[in-house]
Amino acid sequence: TQASGTFHIQHQSLDQTSKFICTMVSHAICFRKIQRRWLSNLSFFSKRRNCSGAEQGSTPSPAEAGKLAYSHRLKRDVKNCNTIGMDTILSHAGLHSPSSNTIGSLNEPLSPPIHLESTYTRPPSGDYFKEEDGGRGWIYSRIGNPTRKLLEETITHLELAGSGERKEDHSLAVTCAFSSGMAAVSSIVLALPQNLHIILPDDIYHGVPTQLKAMFVQRGVTYSATNMTNIQDIEKEIKSSKVNNVLVWMETPSNPGCKVVDIDAVCKLVSICRNDNTNITTAVDSTWAPPNLTQPLLLGADVVMHSGTKYFGGHSDVLLGCTTTSPFTLVGKELGDSIRTIQTTLGSTASPFDCWLTLRGLRTLHLRVERQCQTAMKIATFLSSHKFVEKVHYPGLVSHPQHEIASRQMNGGYGGMLSFEMKDEATAMAVAGAVSTIKRATSLGGTETLIEHRASIEPLDGRVSPDGLLRVSVGLENANDLTRDLEIAIDIANEIVGC
């Protein structure tokens, strides 16, 4: 070695014994150097095993530690939506696509951008979808828009969250965002075969039968109404249908009577009634029970729809509707593409701005609905003990006919909607006229509490509401302020009309 060579040169005059001793010392020095190098290498490989990529012979820098931790976290099973609570899913609505396979991008905005563009440049190859040629799949905003797609994917995630081992089927679900809730309703009807018979609830939002009568009856669609809370009545309607294509339309809780339909029981009945000659589709209008309260697709429904104007948006500033088809039922799998075709070809798509507002609204949906459910229960309890109130309709009351079904089917509350009945229309109108904190308006699901006399807004030949019924959409105000407002209003109505 160089060290031993240097040693010998410096001691050429020594006798043989001295030379031998010096040689042994130099060998010992060399061995010690080799030993230190070997131990250093051993430490290096040990650190590589522990740090997976740290600089040789050193602990990772802070930046490297962060990147390594991120890489390790991606390998963990955090992609399974079933391990994440509904509240967390809602709080992160729009942060990134639920279909992505990462925690999120590394430098993303915490509020999604609004894509207002109507068209997109075409790659030189002419192929919008070929990634190697620069295509990203965007052609024209009616056909597809990034903001609308993000909302649709988020809603799909919400409707199917908690479906357990069936998560692999989620990609088969199709959510379409429409320009209104009624556009969503009509898309379901249009997606089904001709010669269709629709079985409606006897208590239902009047806009549905009004639309059927105005648009679809002349095109061969028939409909009838039945007590959707009675399985025997539904079975009778199905078997008495004169056509082979039947749509069983559920609305739960119902508008405005707050009836609760047993979705699971109805879907099981339909499965029994289906045969080679009868095509039956089950649809649920779950506007009054958003996904954090009820998930109809997990109960067997083929398609669920919402008026996103209501609870999804939550601030009385959105006009939007949506449908989500089931990835678990054969009918649902077939229905998804048909509804998507109707959405894009008829052009009834939700605007990017409304989609963005809805994504924003979803982030607080769980907090709003929780508060609205609590306050609704307090108001319903107050009204049920008032001597001038004849009936109170709210699923949370033990006296409600479907309270047991609601307790089983609705998670975390009984909804923010209720209705109550005064003795006649004049008294009901007087109560509505005397409120102050509560606002007189149609619609529901916003932060402000609304009251409406339903019968007077329904078409004369299609009234579904009792004359004395008042519908209340509970907002976020102090519960005591609302009960006090109703108490004063009822007292004034008594003075004017005489309850």
Image: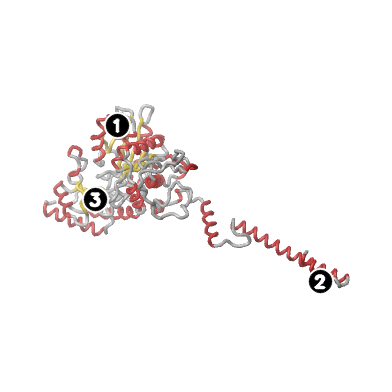
Look at the image and tell me whether residue 57 can be seen.
yes
Query: Real-space Cα distance between discs 3 and 1?
Result: 32 Å
Query: Real-space Cα distance between discs 1 and 2?
Result: 111 Å
Judge by depth and name the residue closer to the eye, 103 or 378: 103
* Image marks 1 and 2: residues in contact by CB distance under 8 Å: no
Three-letter code for the amino acid on which mark 1 is drawn: His
Three-letter code for the amino acid on which mark 3 is drawn: Val
Three-letter code for the amino acid on which mark 2 is drawn: Gln
Residue annotated with mark 3: 472
Residue in the picture at 43% in, 50% down: 96
- Of tags 1 and 2, which is closer to the observer? 2
Residue in the picture at 29% in, 31% down: 197
- Of tags 3 and 2, which is closer to the observer? 2
Residue annotated with mark 2: 10
Q: Position of residue 400 (x, y in %)?
A: 27, 47
Residue annotated with mark 1: 197
